[in-house]
Image (tube, helix red, strand yellow):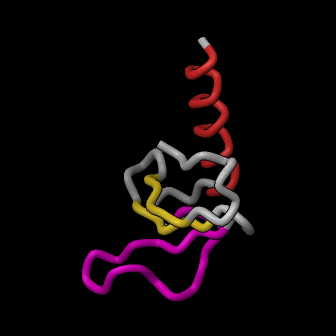
């Protein structure tokens, strides 16, 4: 589940739809992929290292779905 967008400086973990794990900072939106052997990479990425998805789009779509579910 994505973090609350109210917490602009929130940093935590998020999973792409393919299962790849990322360390995420919300402001500015930044993704660091997890490498099972070495922890998280030092260099941020924009596309999923496993499936190639645009991470910002995938994260935003999941956040929007979560907000809609909370309002129902």
Give residue 29's quadrant in the image: bottom right
Query: Going by the image, does 68 lie left or right of 36?
Result: right
> x%, y% of residue 19?
37, 52
Image height of 71 relative to 8, above or below? above
Residue at 57%, 22% in the rendered image: 70
> x%, y% of residue 28?
74, 68
| Residue farthest toward the left in the current orientation of the protein | 37
Give residue 47's quadrant in the image: bottom right
Q: In the image, is residue 38 part of the stretch drawn in magenta?
A: yes
What is the quadrant of the C terminus in the image?
top right
Query: Going by the image, does 42 lie left or right of 18?
Result: right
> x%, y% of residue 50?
45, 62
Residue at 62%, 57% in the rendered image: 55
Q: In the image, is residue 12 part of the stretch drawn in magenta?
A: no
Q: Nearer the viewer, residue 36 or 27?
A: 27
Give residue 8's quadrant in the image: bottom right
Residue at 62%, 39% in the rendered image: 63
Image height of 35 relative to 18, above or below? below
> x%, y% of residue 27?
72, 66
Residue 58 at least partly seen? no
Residue span colored magenta: 30-48
Q: Nearer the viewer, residue 14 or 46?
A: 14
| Residue farthest toward the front in the current orientation of the protein | 7
Image height of 71 relative to 21, above or below? above
Query: Going by the image, does 28 lie left or right of 43?
Result: right
| Residue farthest toward the right in the current orientation of the protein | 28
Residue at 30%, 86% in the rendered image: 38
Residue 38 at least partly seen? yes
Q: How many numbered marks have been drawn onto this rendered protein structure? A: 0
């Amino acid at each position: 589940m994505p973090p609350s967008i109210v917490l602009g400086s929130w940093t935590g973990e998020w999973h792409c739809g393919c299962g790849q794990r990322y360390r995420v900072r919300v402001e500015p939106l930044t993704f660091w992929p997890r490498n099972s052997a070495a922890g998280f990479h030092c260099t941020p990425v924009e596309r999923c290292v496993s499936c190639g998805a645009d991470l910002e789009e995938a994260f935003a779509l999941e956040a929007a779905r979560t907000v809609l579910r909370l309002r129902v």
